[in-house]
Image (cartoon, rainbow, N blue to C red):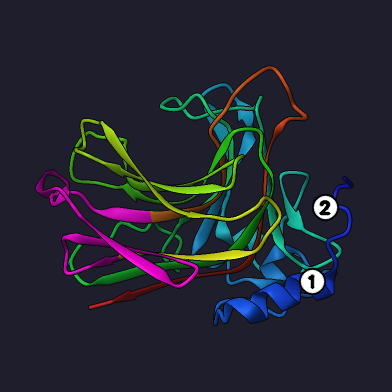
Amino acid sequence: MNRSGVLAGVTVTAVLGALTALGTGDAVAADPTKAPGGNFDLSIWQLQEPVGSPGSPTTVPSSRLQGANGYQDAYFYTDTRDGAMTFWAPEKGVTTPNSSYARSELREMNRGGSAANWSLGGSHKLNATLRVVSVTKNVCVGQIHLGTGGSSTKPLVELYYRANGDIVLGTENSPAGGQTLHTVGRVSVGKTWTYTIAVSGGDTIDLTVNGTTTHYPIPSSFFPYKQYFKAGSYNQSSSSSTTNGARVAFYGLTVSHGG
């Protein structure tokens, strides 16, 4: 595998064909010569990478991510074969104080540069078209995370992709912790798939994977909290290896909020 992160034998035609077959409206006509910010709207995202000082990973603001010549490096880059926005998170890397796992991951922001922090009321959707290029054990590819409103640093939901191809939703039982896992699909490594993580009615998670939707109640203990979306490669395994890890390629990524 080269820096582009594309598996041998996967062609641009094959990837575009998979996107067409899935019928997603979120896939972009990506230009492989541009940085991710030239193909995706990164004005509402901040990037966290698995480098920096212990307990304080490097973050890159949206202002540096935007545009065809925007930020990219070995952990966040455009795949030069198919234009995918690609995230690489090795098993060894700098982590946040509340996690043992490294990540290359986007955190939702407001267009003015402040941190997104929305209430559960209304309609909120994170749509993605992606494929997991490689994974050692397990990787989180999308989240709704708790913002202000209390002391918890837990996510409300996490969407995992496991090395055996299982797609698993983790729903938190309360802000104090305790996660319930739900297997919601299965896709082979390297295959393209879609998800939508949504909140409706202020009290329900609506998860759609490859066109199939399931619903999960939000415990009332989460109601005081604001929320925000995250997406990328949040590796769920750690070791001393900088070559093992999770590489995730996105072909579409959009966020929408309604009243």
Q: Is residue 178 magenta?
A: no
Look at mark 1 in the image and give the residue it sits on.
Answer: 14
Q: Quadrant of residue 259?
A: bottom left
- Front residue of this view, candidates 221 and 51: 221
The residue stretch that appears in magenta = 199-228
- Front residue of this view, candidates 107 and 212: 212
| Rendered location of residue 164, percent (x, y) | 60, 41
Q: Quadrant of residue 200?
A: bottom left
State the residue at coordinates (50%, 68%). 210
Query: Marks 2 and 1, Cα distance to the nearest angstrom?
Result: 12 Å
Q: Are circles 2 and 1 on residues that touch, CB within 8 Å?
A: no
Please, what is the three-letter code of the amino acid marked with disc 1?
Ala
| Rendered location of residue 182, percent (x, y) | 35, 46
Look at mark 2 in the image and give the residue it sits on.
Answer: 7
| Rendered location of residue 76, percent (x, y) | 70, 50
Q: What element does badge 2 sit on? A: loop
Residue 242 in view in this figure: yes
Sequence order check, earlier mark of 2 and 1: 2
Q: Is residue 5 above or below residue 14?
A: above
Please, what is the three-letter code of the amino acid marked with disc 2?
Leu
